Image (cartoon, rainbow, N blue to C red):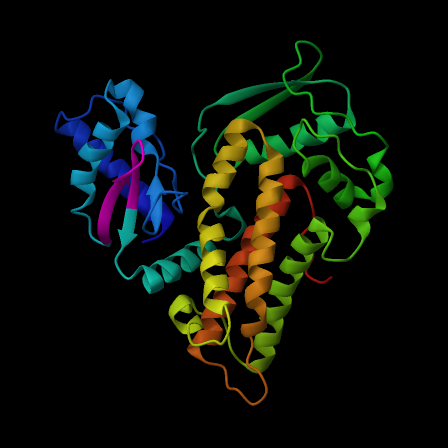
Amino acid sequence: MTPGELSRTVLCAVRRAVDEGELSVAVPRRAVVAPPGPGGCGDYATNIALQLARPAGLPPLRVAEILQQHLVRTDGVAGVVVTGPGFINFSLQGAAGSAAVALTREILRAGAAYGHGDALAGQVIDVRIPYDVRAEVVADALVRIVGSQGGRVEVAHGEPVNLRPVPAPDDPALLGPDAARWALLHPAAHDRPRITADHLVQRESNPLFRVRYAHARTRALSRNAAELGFTPEPGHVEVEAAAVAGPQGDDTSRLLAVLADHPRVLARAAAHRTPDSLARHLVTVADAVLAVMPTVLPRGDEKPSAAHRARLALAEAAGAVLAGGLSLLGIDAPQHL
């Protein structure tokens, strides 16, 4: 079961609780599902009970307990545990394999549109900015990010300004279009951006380079695999990775977690008008996929196996997330670097 499927399952549980008179709320458009945070357990968690508590007139814990009774009867769900003030945690059946396969397939099917949704469908967000280059770039990114969630941004200048990021100290155009946009979008709005040549350096110390390099490497892996005669095929990559010496299994689990978290990051960046959170997430994805790349292709006389095909599929999925995220920021995702 993918995070998207689990999200729909949660909404179905809310709808059943409403139909049976246990909850008196409007069924939300979306339930955010993500890897559990500190104090959580299982494979995924949702805060839907906290979201519905106020309109339901009930404590979040009680809402969670009501939904828990509907969710435990769901196919594909091995267990449902309520933690903290009302977080619902899920353990999925065969999560080590089937969830990874389903997630990879979902991303490859959606491509760069993975994580797009309708959380802001029908909403028009009025953004008023000063005449400033950083404000212009942030607003331009928000048009695309909010659009990815079904909303629309209308940008205007002048008072009353409601989006005023700290201006750049120097002209970012000297960095070129991609590095300039990254320099303005990667820092939080309240932080002063650095307009320095560091953004052009092709080293690990440069986050933009790591993101674009990771995407280019995923494309190179696909080309190299084709030359070796094999193609990507989603498989039980976590199980297969357990046979690899070293911490590869942990690296694979980390990559799966950040890919599963991408829809939540996009929805949050749109709702809170924070393209910087998407930029930082792309760095996390890049670092995670770079860690698993050494085992994607066969080594020496090794023949391509199901494990190689599964890891290639996962790498291509990460590449799609990186390409989609960079596109929303208005930055090119290179095929070669």
Residue 334 in percent (x, y) is at 69, 56
Let me know if residue 69 appears in the view.
Answer: yes
Residue, far bottom: 301
Q: Quadrant of the C terminus?
A: bottom right
Residue 298, x across and y down, in percent: 55, 81
36 lies left or right of 195: left
User: Which of these two is toward me, 35 or 265?
Assistant: 35
Can you say which quadrant of the picture contains the N terminus?
bottom left
User: At which x and y percent is residue 294?
Assistant: 58, 72
Q: Nearer the viewer, residue 270 or 87?
A: 87
Residue at x 66%, y 9% (from the top left corner): 160
Give x and y (percent) for residue 7: 33, 42
- Is residue 308 left or right of 167 when viewed as pictured? left
Is 57 above or below relative to 171? above
Task: Decide if residue 235 is in sight here.
Answer: no
Residue at the limit of the structure toward the left, as seen here: 20
